[in-house]
């Protein structure tokens, strides 16, 4: 059994009520208004920008997809006058499991609305059953919408070829290691291998002319990314650093901001706490440090 599987088993044993209690640190609240208030505070107090996401995935009825899209349009209207906010959107939440054509239509229309409003939109990357669809959709839509970005996960063996498939698009890519459990025949299993692959991916993305969102909390790799940026003389309008809300990296974020770098936090919110609990369980399974913090919290309350 892999370390990831062991952590996943452990996180599944933690009662949902305790996960929910701890989730507040990592979730922007239980309403759009609370998430936007969190984004306002990040920017006004610290100069940190945000990408706001409604948690939830694998919607399997047209009614639930319509519900989700209504929330996305309301969210876009709410951030229209907030240039420090962008949005993230998930294919699994916007129609893929009902009808992939419906998902394409929904994201196409929403990207058009975001472009008209001047707000960025990132198509999130979910489990590997959506990778081909997500990238094919991105390649189709990106030429129409300059504000559109997506995500590549360095843990996947296929990612170098996926980078090649984006040549000429001037893509906006969140470069991360990814959090979904992927079997050994498709992905690296050791964090060090994933992070080394992340550095190679970042360099290739820069060489191909893309905008790169360096998404890591590891100071070693942040420093290496900054050294690469300096070596290649990458201008500041071609990259940013991204992290998750709640992960304790205040000092690193402050250092980056003081150095004139753009920092953006992923600010999720949940209208149903089951979605927030599922989100945090995935984060716990992917990150031993988060798992330890939650387990410490459980012990202190027992």
Image (tube, rainbow, N blue to C red):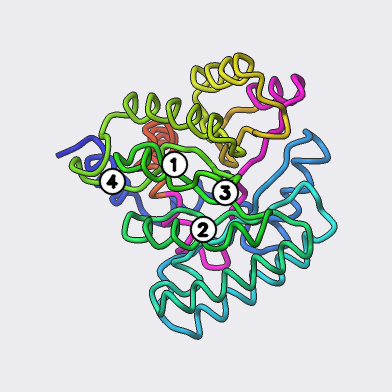
Q: Which residue is mark 4?
A: 8
Residue 138, image x, y percentages: 51, 58
In the rendered structure, are the residues bearing label 3 and label 2 in contact, judged by CB atoms less than 8 Å apart? no
Which badge, 3 or 4, is on the more N-terminal residue? 4
Which badge, 1 or 2, is on the more N-terminal residue? 2
Dividing the picture into quadrants, the one containing residue 212 is: top right
Q: CA distance from mark 1 to mark 3?
A: 11 Å
Q: Which mark is residue 138?
A: 2
In the rendered image, the vertical position of residue 192 relative to residue 276, given as above or below: above
Q: CA distance from mark 3 to mark 2?
A: 10 Å
Say which element carries label 2.
Answer: helix
Which badge, 4 or 1, is on the more N-terminal residue? 4
Q: Give the residue at x 54% y 29%.
A: 207
The crowding category of the residue bearing disc 4, from other C-alpha atoms within 10 Å (few below 14, some 14 to 19, many at least 20), is some
**Boundaries of the magenta span:** 251-280
In front: label 3 or label 2:
3
């Amino acid at each position: 059994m892999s370390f990831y599987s062991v952590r996943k088993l452990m996180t599944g044993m933690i009662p949902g009520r305790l996960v929910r209690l701890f989730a507040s640190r990592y979730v922007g609240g239980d309403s759009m208004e609370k998430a936007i208030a969190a984004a306002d505070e990040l920017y006004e107090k610290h100069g940190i920008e945000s990408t706001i996401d409604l948690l939830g995935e694998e919607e399997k009825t047209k009614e639930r997809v319509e519900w989700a899209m209504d929330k996305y349009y309301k969210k876009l209207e709410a951030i229209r006058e907030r240039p420090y906010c962008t949005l993230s959107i998930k294919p699994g939440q916007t129609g893929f499991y009902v009808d992939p054509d419906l998902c394409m239509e929904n994201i196409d229309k929403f990207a058009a609305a975001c472009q008209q409003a001047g707000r960025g939109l990132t198509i999130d990357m979910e489990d590997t059953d959506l990778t081909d669809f997500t990238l094919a959709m991105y390649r189709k839509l990106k030429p129409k919408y300059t504000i559109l970005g997506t995500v590549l996960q360095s843990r996947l063996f296929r990612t170098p070829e996926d980078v090649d498939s984006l040549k000429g698009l001037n893509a906006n890519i969140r470069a991360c290691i990814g959090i979904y459990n992927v079997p050994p025949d498709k992905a690296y299993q050791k964090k060090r291998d994933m992070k080394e692959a992340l550095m190679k991916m970042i360099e290739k993305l820069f060489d191909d002319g893309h905008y790169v969102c360096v998404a890591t909390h590891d100071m070693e790799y942040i420093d290496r990314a900054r050294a690469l940026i300096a070596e290649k003389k990458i201008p500041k309008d071609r990259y940013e650093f991204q992290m998750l809300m709640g992960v304790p990296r205040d000092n690193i974020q402050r250092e980056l901001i003081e150095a004139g770098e753009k920092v953006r936090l992923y600010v999720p919110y949940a209208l149903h706490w089951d979605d927030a609990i599922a989100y945090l369980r995935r984060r716990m399974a992917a990150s031993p440090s988060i798992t330890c913090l939650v387990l410490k919290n459980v012990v202190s309350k027992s």
